[in-house]
Every structure is written in structure tokens, then in C-alpha cells.
Image (cartoon, grey):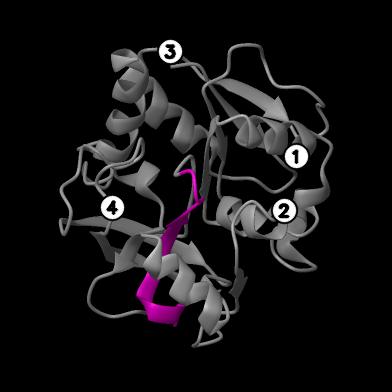
Amino acid sequence: MNAAIIVFPGTNRERDVALALKRVTGRKPHMLWHRDTELPAGLDLVVLPGGFSYGDYLRCGAMAAQSPIMRAVRAHAERGGLVLGVCNGFQMLTEAGLLPGALLRNASLRFLAMDCTMRVERADTAFTHHFQRGQTFGATLAHGDGNYFADDATLDRLEGEGLVALRYEGENRNGSARSIAGILSPNLRVLGLMPHPENCTDPLVGGTDGLPMFTSLAESFTAA
């Protein structure tokens, strides 16, 4: 699998994602700066990692969504390439129009930094086929704006088309509509989620609950 991670001013989870990808592929992903304008040839996966792009001083992800590299990311998604957006990366995907809805301030109006549990709603995608539908797994929250919001018509469409990939199991700490933790694009090739699976891929650091997501991605291309 040929993967690239986009780094923005304020990104702070790129190395965690890189280690997770290298663990399952044996290859270092490309690290691309947000001012780059092209993606490497033959790229399979683009990751928009977590952090505080541009300091989150405006609307989280809004400035990053206008970065030069995002035109190439949109083109990659439009031709069926895989895109994974985690935390701030999920915010960028909604701001860029690659996923619907928005991420608002947490219901508590406080930054959340803690463990959470998610339930797998779709286990037949490139991101999730190493899970089972209904399986729960742990990850970490680290965000102030993780409250997923969309109007009722959009939420009903996501539900009806099976585009809710992950939900919070148990307490929904950030107040996300219908306990949504992650959603998919209609072609199932773009996934945005708030919790950090990359922080749960090493038994010495947080366990391995998130490893199946990266194994799923790697084996999708091994099989191909």
C-alpha cells in the first residue's frame, strides 16, 4: 500500500499514523506538506491526521481545507482513492465538502482527552473489514470540537444509505448526533472519524484495539 500523510501547521498526530501504517505495511508513508500541490504517483491512501491545524483559531479544519494540497486530495477522492481523516482530519473533510455535516464544540464546552469505546456499524469496507459488525473497540479522544452535527434529512440519509461507520458505545461524551463517531462517503472510499485509532496500535502504548483498521487498509491492497 502506497500511503501519504498530509502535514499542516499545527498537526501533531502524523508520526502516530506513520508508525501505525509502517507496522502493517513495512513501508514508511510519504509525508507531504500542506503547501505541496501534487500527490505522489500511484498513491492508494491519503491520511489527514489529527492536531490543531492553524491553531484552530477560526473554525476547526476550515483553513486547512483551503490549503493548496487539498485540491489534489479532492481529485484523489473523486477518482476512487482512499482518504482517511482522523479528528482534525475529519473536520477538514467536512469543511472541504468531502463528507457532510460539521463538527461543533463539545456539548460540555470542554476539551476531552480520554479513552472511548466505538461500535462498528459497517464491517465491509476497506477501513473496517478486519472488524465484525457490532464489534466494539477502544480508542482515544483528544478534541474540543468533536460534536458531529447534521440536519435531520442528512442524518436520515446517512442512516438509510448505511454510511454511519462507527458510533460511540456507552456514554456519548461530545454530544454527537445519534452517537456518530465516524461516517463514510457514498462510495465508501472516504472515512472521517473523531477518535484516534492510531494511538491504539502498539501493545506497549495504548493497546492494539485500533490496529484492525490499518490492517484492513493494508490487506485491501495486498488482495488487489
Amino acid type of the residue that numbered disc 1 sits on in the rendered structure: Met
Cα separation, mark 3 vs mark 1, equals 24 Å
Q: What residue type is labelled 2?
A: Ala
What residue is shown with label 3? 27
Query: In the picture provided, is 96 more to the left or to the right than 195?
Result: right
Magenta-drawn stretch contains 185? yes
Q: Nearer the viewer, residue 37 or 117?
A: 37
Determine whether label 2 and label 1 are within 8 Å by CB.
Answer: yes
- State which mark lies toward you, 3 or 2: 2
Instruction: Name the quadrant of the N terminus.
Output: top left
Check the picture and name the quadrant holding the C terminus.
Answer: top left
Q: Of the residues shown, which amino acid type is indicated by label 4? A: Arg
Left or right of 94 on screen, residue 70:
right
- Examine the structure image and report whether residue 218 is included in the region drawn in magenta: no
Element marked by disc 3: loop
Q: From the image, tell me which residue sits under label 4.
A: 122
Q: How dense is the environment of label 2, judged by Cα within 10 Å: few (below 14), some, or many (20 and up)?
A: many
Mark 1 = which residue?
Answer: 70
**Mark 1 burial class by Cα count in 10 Å: few <14, some 14-19, many 20+:** many
